[in-house]
Amino acid sequence: MYSIGELSRETGVKVPTIRFYEDKGLLPEPERTSGNQRRYDDAALRCLQFIRHTRDLGLPLADIEALLTLEGARGEDLNRAHDIAERQLSDLRDRIARLGRLEKELARITKACDGKHDHVCAVLHAFGDHGTCEESH
Amino acid sequence: MYSIGELSRETGVKVPTIRFYEDKGLLPEPERTSGNQRRYDDAALRCLQFIRHTRDLGLPLADIEALLTLEGARGEDLNRAHDIAERQLSDLRDRIARLGRLEKELARITKACDGKHDHVCAVLHAFGDHGTCEESH
DNA sequence: TGTAGTTCCTCTAGCCACTAGAGGTTCAAG
DNA sequence: CTTGAACCTCTAGTGGCTAGAGGAACTACA
């Protein structure tokens, strides 16, 4: 049995965040001591690790909740887990592509001004000027 | 002179968002008609385009505000604009690297389950199991 | 057994950057 | 002069937490 603080140290999820997940229905309500403090078992620990991991992967809480309700499912329903993963992957690839374009432009902007501040800073100009971007965003 | 709707169409920034920016002090308060409606000039248009562009680049509003107050600055202060740009670039590169690692893992997870749902879905297992990740995140 | 210090409890409010909706007013075209 | 779109202010909601207040409970040591 873990206190909320121990669970926090085990999983790296902050204490208020654990309570927040419970509130949102992602973590089942744990047992309490006679003094009303939460006590968690290993199942709760695994559940929280699952949440942590999927959050790190960028899944929104709603998707994580959907995945959690699929535990123990089979057949048709399992396709939904696969769909969620595929959708996330495609979202992620979009984000990466977009950020790559932005990186190119930010690099251009910072270079525009390296060192020389003669009169008007080129960074400010470049920040304001979308027209000089090579690609859309 | 533009109405708020025209300004919105010109810049691609939604009407409530324009008002929001004004509220936050990013856009100066525009003139009003006798009937209390906002009327914008070209300076406001350029300002909003600057905000839009820098937001697209991922800068938080606080940084954008800092940049806006630097307009017309010179010497020392201009280094701050450059610093902001450099910091953003470095943040961005971190984010891209991190997302790249996540992409690898999500790809692994979706592949783990392609097609075959014999008993327990490997996606669910893989989502829960950080230990099988090749890299940290 | 007492007490000190840490951890826990609930609750409210704040963060960012918007977005949505209610309920009412003004503008522009015909 | 009427109609309908666009405008006004204001409040509240989103996601995913985080911070703080004010108080109760647990743990270690004397």
Image (cartoon, coloured by chain):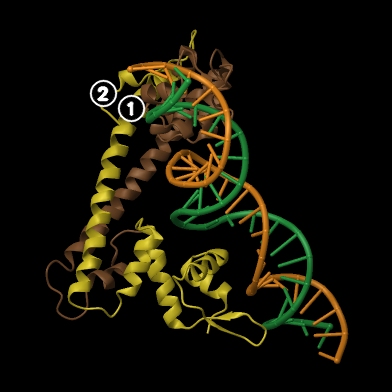
Chain colours: A yellow, B brown, C orange, D green
Q: Quadrant of the C terminus of chain B?
A: bottom left
Q: Residues within 10 Å of mark 2 (few under 14, many from 20)?
A: few
SS of the residue under disc 2: loop
Q: Are marks 1 and 2 in contact (CB under 8 Å)?
A: yes
Q: Which residue is mark 2?
A: A134
| Amino acid type at image mark 1 | Glu
| Amino acid type at image mark 2 | Glu
Q: Is residue A64 left or right of residue C11?
A: left
Q: Is residue A81 left or right of residue B57?
A: left
Q: Which residue is mark 1?
A: A105
Q: Nearer the viewer, residue B40 or A133?
A: B40
Question: Measuring 37% from the left and 21% from the top, which residue is drawn there?
Answer: B10
Q: Is residue B57 left or right of residue B83?
A: left
Q: Quadrant of residue A65?
A: bottom left
Work out which residue is located at the far left of the displayed protein and give it: B115
Q: Chain of mark 1?
A: A
Q: Nearer the viewer, residue B5 or C4?
A: B5
Residue B100 point in image, percent of width and height: 28, 49
Residue B27 point in image, percent of width and height: 54, 24
**Can residue A81 be seen by looking at this rendering?**
yes
Q: Residues within 10 Å of mark 1 (few under 14, many from 20)?
A: many
- Disc ID at residue B29: none
Residue D11 point in image, percent of width and height: 61, 47
Question: Measuring 41% from the left and 70% from the top, which residue is drawn there?
Answer: A49
